Image: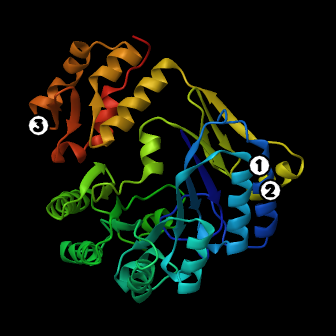
């Protein structure tokens, strides 16, 4: 079983914090769609004809595509791949793109899961982030979507300068009150070369507070656990049975094909990423060529990726996988983990090593400390 990710590199406007590949010009959108259809055909054998269990339209803002364009892409995928009958098909959308006719069209086209980029229900936060939608649209979009999609997720951002704990709680409680089954919650990060990075360096915007972000993350975990959500990955919370199957496949090391400029692919042994330039991507597809960099993963890279991804999940690191797949003895790895277990950052549950709440605050650092430098 495998997945397909499709990167749609268009947005209405640039959010100050975003470092994903996108453009705010729609000038070449038609040419891009034609190029994407060509890439689907060129990459039809990449996943060795495995069944496709998830398709994810990400970006960028995929909801800027017309229903005809989305349907054309899905039809092309259906032609060249074996799509499972219960395939999870997710469309990322912004609140300002949601309307009743669009919801009806998306559902009819086969989209069965929405990812709505709300980020905040407060107007001042949305303006600070330079989001394209308004606070009222954030709430209205969810009210419109729920009658059509019971499988949907909301993105929220915490740790913004000026976002008090009370405001953060109100954002979360707004989603809970609507019984949204899935939330993805991210701490605001200042990525290099973004408008936010420039504004902070020019002292035109307040910098983030790591201590405040940690406090709001701890509060988030408490609130959602009390509301019956599984904290199944560091940034993701779901009602039982409502996890993102697509994102879960990444953390489980399943194969996936990435289509579109900047998209990444993984076939079990090799990682590949497309050129992050729209015009060069389009030109290459017109010549029936794939312009991508490739990397053959070593044993050590695969081992470290397993440690990093597994540690981020609710299930944690499986000592049997380390032993059987990577030939790392359990006793040897437990010695590496001992200081984190002694300080209550990690707990052992049967054969799994899992982060505690306090450990989740340090997930990246703990994973990096556990990495192997060479084959054992």
On the picture, is 311 further left or further right than 117?
Answer: left
Whether residue 25 is visible here, answered yes or no, is no
**Mark 2 / mark 3, whichever is N-terminal:** 2
What colouring does the structure picture have? rainbow
Q: Secondary structure at mark 1?
A: helix
**Mark 3 / mark 1, whichever is N-terminal:** 1
Which residue appears at 19% of the width and 18% of the height? 335
Residue at the bottom extreme, as displayed: 136
Report crowding for label 1: few under 14, some 14 to 19, many 20 or more residues within 10 A (C-alpha).
many
Which residue appears at 61% of the width and 40% of the height? 265
Report crowding for label 2: few under 14, some 14 to 19, many 20 or more residues within 10 A (C-alpha).
many
Q: Which one is closest to the eye, mark 2 or mark 3?
A: 2
Tags 2 and 1 touching, CB below 8 Å: yes
Q: Secondary structure at mark 3?
A: loop
Q: Which one is closest to the eye, mark 3 or mark 1?
A: 1
Q: Which residue is mark 2?
A: 35
Q: Which residue is mark 3?
A: 344
Residue at the right extreme, as displayed: 287
Give x and y (percent) for residue 118: 41, 74
In this rendering, is residue 348 above or below 137? above
CA separation in Å, label 2 and label 1: 6 Å
Tags 2 and 3 touching, CB below 8 Å: no
Give x and y (percent) for residue 189: 40, 58
Q: Which residue is mark 1?
A: 39
Give x and y (percent) for residue 149: 44, 72
In this rendering, is residue 163 above or below 42? below
Q: Nearer the viewer, residue 100 or 313?
A: 100
């Amino acid at each position: 079983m495998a997945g397909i990710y499709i990167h749609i590199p268009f947005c209405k406007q640039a959010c100050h914090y975003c470092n994903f590949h996108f453009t705010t010009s729609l000038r070449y959108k038609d040419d891009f769609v034609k190029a994407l259809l060509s890439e689907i055909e060129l990459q039809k054998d990449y996943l060795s004809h495995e069944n496709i269990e998830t398709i994810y339209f990400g970006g960028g803002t995929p909801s800027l595509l017309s229903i005809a364009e989305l349907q054309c892409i899905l039809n092309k995928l259906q032609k060249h791949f074996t799509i499972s009958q219960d395939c999870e098909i997710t469309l990322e959308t912004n609140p300002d793109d949601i309307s009743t006719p669009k919801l009806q069209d998306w559902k009819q086209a086969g989209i069965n899961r929405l990812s709505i980029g709300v980020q905040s229900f407060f107007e001042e936060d949305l303006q600070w982030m330079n989001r394209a939608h308004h606070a009222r649209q954030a709430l209205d979009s969810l009210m419109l979507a729920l009658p059509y999609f019971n499988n949907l997720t909301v993105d929220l951002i915490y740790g913004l300068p000026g976002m008090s704990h009370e405001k953060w709680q109100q954002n979360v409680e707004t989603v809970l009150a609507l019984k949204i089954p899935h939330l993805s919650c991210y701490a605001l990060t200042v990525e290099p070369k973004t408008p936010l990075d420039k504004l902070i360096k020019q002292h035109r915007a307040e910098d983030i507070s790591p201590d405040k972000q940690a406090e709001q993350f701890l509060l988030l975990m408490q609130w959602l656990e009390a509301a019956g959500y599984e904290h199944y990955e560091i940034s993701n919370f779901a009602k039982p049975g409502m996890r993102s199957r697509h994102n879960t496949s990444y953390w489980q090391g399943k194969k996936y094909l990435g289509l579109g400029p900047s998209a990444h692919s993984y076939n079990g042994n090799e990682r590949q990423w497309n050129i992050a330039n729209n015009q060069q991507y389009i030109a290459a597809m017109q010549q029936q060529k794939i312009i991508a960099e490739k990397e053959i993963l070593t044993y050590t890279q695969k081992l470290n990726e397993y440690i990093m991804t597994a540690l981020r999940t609710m299930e944690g690191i499986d000592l049997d996988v380390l032993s059987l797949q990577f030939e790392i003895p359990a006793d040897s790895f437990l010695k590496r983990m001992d200081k984190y277990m002694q300080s209550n950052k990690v707990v052992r549950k049967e054969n799994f090593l899992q982060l505690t709440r306090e450990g989740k605050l340090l997930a990246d650092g703990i994973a990096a400390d556990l990495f192997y430098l060479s084959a054992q």
